[in-house]
Amino acid sequence: MNRRNMLWSAVSGLGAALGASSAKAAADAGTGNRLKVVYHLSDAEKVNFVLGNIQNHIDGVGGPDHVTIALVIHGPALKAFHSAQANPDISKRVGDFTKDGVELAACGNTMKAQNVTLTELLPGFVSAEKGGVVRLAELQSQGYLYLRP
């Protein structure tokens, strides 16, 4: 084997090892082998789409015990989660997600702008006091994969 072939074999082997390591890291992100995913929602017209994505995600991995999901909501989309305005389908989905352990975080800045308190949102929400974008960054720094459908 000449030097060029030896070098190519070494580089190929290193690339394969790094690829396998990256895939394993992505699979292991989270508790045990559970992926951690944060969904970002700010567009009012995407509320049902994103809630459907989250349910499909939970179903696709075999249930809530196989994934850790957070949903961070800010901007116009938060209005859909005001208790007084929420439609029955959204209320049911939020209740189901709460039972499944999905973290539902409402942007503190948006809550102030919309003049709404945590008690006026559907049950199960927590306040992202520092802001929705700050919460998104915190979760990403904890290994959550970011999805913005």
Image (cartoon, rainbow, N blue to C red):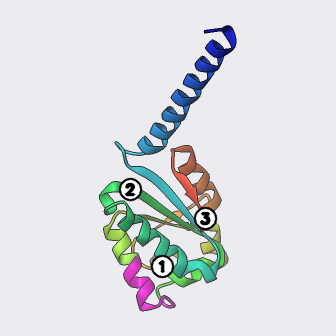
Q: Residue at x 31, y 63 (%)?
A: 63
Q: CA distance from mark 2 to mark 3?
A: 17 Å
Label 2 packing within 10 angstroms: few (<14), some (14-19), many (20+): many
Instruction: Return the disc, 1 or 3, that comes first in the chain's sequence.
Output: 1
* Mark closest to the chain's N terminus, 2 or 3: 2
Q: Which residues are magenta?
A: 84-93
Q: Position of residue 128 (x, y in %)?
A: 55, 61
Which numbered tag is attached to residue 67? 2
For residue 147, above or below residue 51: above
Q: Does label 2 or label 1 sit earlier along the sequence?
A: 2
How many other residues sit within 10 Å of disc 1, few (<14), some (14-19) or many (≥20)? many
Point out the image quarter for the N terminus.
top right
Look at 45% across and 52% down and name the residue there: 36
Give me the residue at 65% from left, 79% from top: 76
Q: How many marks?
A: 3
| Local secondary structure at mark 3 | loop
Q: Are marks 1 and 3 in contact (CB under 8 Å)?
A: no
- Amino acid at dot 1: Leu
Q: Kindly identify which numbered label has been placed on residue 121.
A: 1
Q: Which residue is mark 3?
A: 148
Q: Position of residue 131 (x, y in %)?
A: 62, 61
Q: Is residue 123 visible?
A: yes
> Tags 2 and 1 in contact by the CB under 8 Å rule?
no
Query: Image quarter for residue 41?
Result: bottom right
Question: x and y percent of residue 35 in the render?
Answer: 43, 50
**What crowding class fits label 3: few (fewer than 14 Cα within 10 Å), some (14-19), or many (20 or more)?**
few
Say which element carries label 2.
Answer: strand
